[in-house]
Image (cartoon, helix red, strand yellow):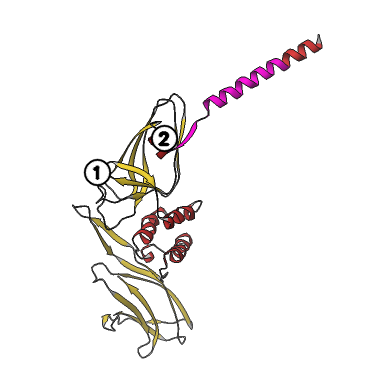
Amino acid sequence: MLNYFSTLVFSLSAIIFTIIISAFTYNAPKSLSLIDAIDNNTITATITSSGNYSGNCINIKLKNNTNVPLKITSLGGTNFSPEDEGEQTLIQLEDIFLVLKPNSEYNGKIAAFCTEASDRCPSNSTKMSPSKNNNPNLDKLVAYLKGKHIPKTTYQDAVWSISDNKPISNIANDNMASKDLRTYLAGLTGQKDSWFSSPQNVQVDESGNFNCETININGALEFDCKKGAKVRQDIMKSNGEPMFESNKTMTAQTTHVKYRFRMSVKGWEKGDYYVKIHDGTTTLATYDFFI
């Protein structure tokens, strides 16, 4: 009798275990990339621009055409190209994973960033097509960003430093993560990692073209001098012509001075300039910058 009940319990346990395994196997979402799922008609996708060039500017609507759950993956490095070749292709920098129930729909947004600053901003509601990125340095940027707490406000300028050779100085250097990103991009692009940051005011005109203007120059300066020296700073054009001469002095409290520099340059003519630090007779340090 004991053997009969033991066998019965074992058999029932095996059946229950098999049912549980079968249930989990049946309900496990099928994994597909966004591009493959569209190509084989597993999903129907409507992907459009919101009319912007960075941030959550891709509208995406997906329809699961199957009676099984799907896990749709859109990896960082995916490009979104507009119908109009004169408009900008955008790149997604972070991985996205979406689970669609059988025969269900999903509506959402994808963060993406312009890779063609010389083209026009994508127009509102224009259709976008996903494809794989073919710029290896942008793929390296995607890999670098993984797992790091880097301000997303730096993403567009980081992309442009690679895709359009824009200055990495456009990225703020006011925190360690951003400083490390600038150092990485300098090695990747061959640019100099300058002492200053030059945030841009980016405006899009009625035709979708970009107008970028430097609004200020800021960074850390340092120099050596005699303790107690009366020090001034002037702003000079690259040819040595004074742009701004200060009448104010600061008294050096040590022989090695460090301080934060910030200056508004909105409306200034584009070109090369430098900060001249002096005591009235001797130049103590110069720092080049450009607008």
Q: Position of residue 64 (x, y in %)?
A: 40, 29
Q: Are marks 2 and 1 in contact (CB under 8 Å)?
A: no
Lower position in the chain sequence, tag 2 or tag 1: 2
Residue occupying the far right of the picture: 2
* Residue bearing mark 1: 124
Q: Is residue 20 covered in magenta?
A: yes
Q: Is residue 140 left or right of residue 23?
A: left
Q: Residues within 10 Å of mark 1 (few under 14, many from 20)?
A: few
Residue 263 in the image: above or below residue 228: above
Q: Where is residue 56, by image quadrant?
A: top left
Image quadrant where one finds the N terminus: top right
Q: Which mark is residue 223?
A: none
Name the foreground residue: 132 vs 103.
132
Amino acid type assigned to the residue bearing label 1 in the image: Asn
| Count of all numbered marks drawn on residues in the image | 2
Amino acid type assigned to the residue bearing label 2 in the image: Ala
Q: Position of residue 91 (x, y in %)?
A: 37, 50
Residue 30 in the image: above or below residue 149: above
Residue occupying the far bottom of the picture: 281
Q: Where is residue 101, by image quadrant?
A: top left
Q: Is residue 28 left or right of residue 209?
A: right
Q: Is residue 245 left or right of residue 13?
A: left
Q: Is residue 126 left or right of residue 40?
A: left
Q: Position of residue 71 (x, y in %)?
A: 47, 34
Give SS at disc 2. Answer: helix
* Residue bearing mark 2: 37
Tell me the residue at 50%/30% (across/down).
Answer: 29
Residue segment shown in magenta: 10-33
